[in-house]
Image: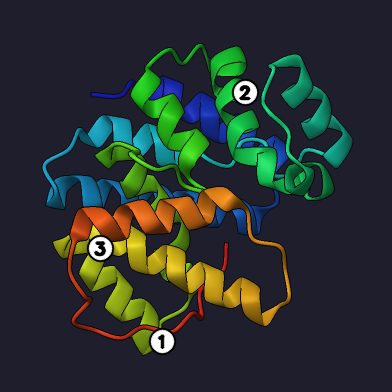
Amino acid sequence: MWDASFRQGVLDWLAANVPASRLNHILRVEAMAVELAVQHGLNVDQAAQSGLMHDLAKYFKPERLLKMARSADIELDPILVDNPHLLHADISAIVAQNEFGVVDEAVLQAIRHHTLGQPEMPPLSCVVYLADSLEPGRGDNPALQSLRQISRENLYQGVWLTAEASMELLFGRRCLIHPRTIATRNWAMQVTGKTPTVAVKAENQR
């Protein structure tokens, strides 16, 4: 089991570095990641760790995110340069390593992948990607309820439709869409290999 004192240390760090509303979101992501891990037969401790640490860098300033990304040789495309907040997932994984000594690559990958996704990402990454978008604090409309149920039944269909929902939301806001989000949607759709049985609309947010 994940050491309780380690978890408390992460919570203490978060309490000093993110607002209470974000900490509540993080705790809900942790809980939903655990729920999905149980549902899909995955490692519960890894899911809890990934969920709890997925937003460590959420409130880092854009200049800090870009500086850390360059120091870590993270490839920066024009969309990331113009929207540094999208880097918080990659940088959160670095913080997990540097601040808390996390070396479990599955956990680090799940943290890195939770915002934009990644084609061929492993099931644990899918779980945290879905938990971040679909945790109860995102709302309780029929679209979100449908996405949650689909995610309990089929991780990849959940990723496909959640990515589509995120894209629809970004279309509506006239925002740039990172190619990784599109690639993630296409990959998950191909893995699923079928048309969804439930139509969903985008009303969730990251």
Quadrant for residue 47, please give it. Answer: top left
- Mark 2, Cα crowd under 10 Å, few <14 / some 14-19 / many 20+, is many
Q: Amino acid at mark 3?
A: Gln
| Residue that protrudes farthest toward the right in the picture | 63
- Compare marks 1 and 3 and give the one earlier in the sequence: 1
Position of residue 179 relative to residue 133, above or below, is above
Please, what secondary structure does the residue beneath circle 1 have? loop
Please, what secondary structure does the residue beneath circle 2 have? helix
Q: CA distance from mark 1 to mark 3?
A: 19 Å
Q: Residue 182, percent across and down? A: 50, 57
Give the residue drawn at x 42%, y 51%: 184
Q: Which residue is mark 3?
A: 157
Which dot marks residue 168? none
Q: Which residue is mark 2?
A: 95
Q: Amino acid at mark 2?
A: Val
Q: In screen coordinates, is 113 left or right of 199?
A: right
Quarter the C terminus occupies: bottom right
Does any portion of residue 131 appear in the rendered image?
no
Q: Which residue is mark 1?
A: 141
- Compare marks 1 and 2 and give the one earlier in the sequence: 2
Q: Amino acid at mark 1?
A: Asn
Give the residue drawn at x 83%, y 25%: 67
- Mark 3, Cα crowd under 10 Å, few <14 / some 14-19 / many 20+, is many
Q: Residue 150, percent across and down? A: 22, 69
Quarter the N terminus occupies: top left
